[in-house]
């Protein structure tokens, strides 16, 4: 059993990308689905599918065929040390070419969306 589902998601994507796999399957959670949806919307992964297998849901991610679609996935806020930021202090990743994902009071969103809405929150991860 694992304690941090977001770290599990990022590690599975990182490992599958390194092994040149096209599909990653993992246990389902709403937060994982939201983070995966953001990655899909920004072109880092190709698709997100929720599958029902018996009594359990699973999350199936289709990875992009471009091996350089995801260079790095870094978990920022961890269970042992939560990292929060104000809207004006949301970091830029690689001068705006990367992506930071936040959990705000209005849901999970990118740093760019949170800055536009004037929302701060918990920094989940950085992707480039």
Image (cartoon, rainbow, N blue to C red):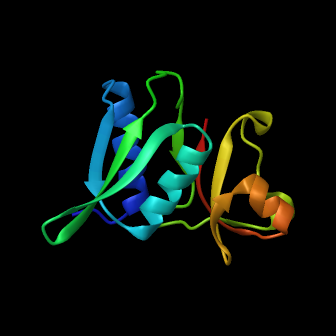
* Residue drawn at x 27%, y 48% as measured from the top left: 25
72 or 115, which lies in front?
Answer: 115
Instruction: Identify whether 10 is placed above or below 59.
Output: above
Residue situated furthest bottom in the rendering? 105
Q: State whether residue 31 is above or below residue 25.
A: below
Q: Is residue 20 above or below residue 80?
A: above
Residue 31 visible in the picture: yes
Q: How many marks?
A: 0
The answer to whether residue 66 is left or right of residue 21 is: right
Q: Measuring 83% from the left and 67% from the top, which residue is drawn there? A: 117
Give the percent coordinates (x, y) of residue 56: 20, 68
Location of residue 11 in the rendering, given as x and y in whole percent from the top left corner: 37, 44
Answer with left or right where residue 98 lies relative to residue 87: left
Residue farthest left in this picture: 54
At a point 31% along the width and 42% down the height, the residue shown is 24
Dividing the picture into quadrants, the one containing residue 86 is bottom right
Residue 9 in picture, x, y percent from top left:
39, 51
Q: Position of residue 33 (x, y in %)?
A: 44, 60
* Image height of 71 relative to 92, above or below: above
Task: Tell me: 75 left or right of 17.
Answer: right
Please report the residue visible at 43 percent of the width from the left and 69 percent of the height from the top. Answer: 30
Is residue 79 among the parts visible in the rendering?
no
The quarter of the image holding the N terminus is bottom left
| Quadrant containing the C terminus in the rendered view | top right
């Amino acid at each position: 059993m694992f304690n941090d589902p977001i770290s599990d998601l990022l590690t599975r994507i990182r490992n599958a990308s390194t092994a040149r796999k096209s599909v990653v399957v993992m246990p389902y959670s709403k937060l994982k689905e939201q983070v995966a949806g953001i990655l899909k919307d920004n072109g880092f992964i190709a698709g997100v599918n929720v599958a029902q297998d018996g009594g359990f849901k699973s999350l199936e991610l289709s990875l992009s065929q471009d091996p350089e679609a995801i260079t790095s996935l870094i978990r920022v806020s961890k269970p042992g040390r939560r990292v929060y930021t104000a809207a004006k202090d949301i970091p830029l990743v690689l001068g705006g070419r990367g992506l930071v994902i936040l959990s705000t009071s209005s849901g999970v969103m990118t740093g760019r969306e949170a800055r536009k809405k004037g929302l701060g929150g918990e920094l989940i991860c950085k992707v480039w």
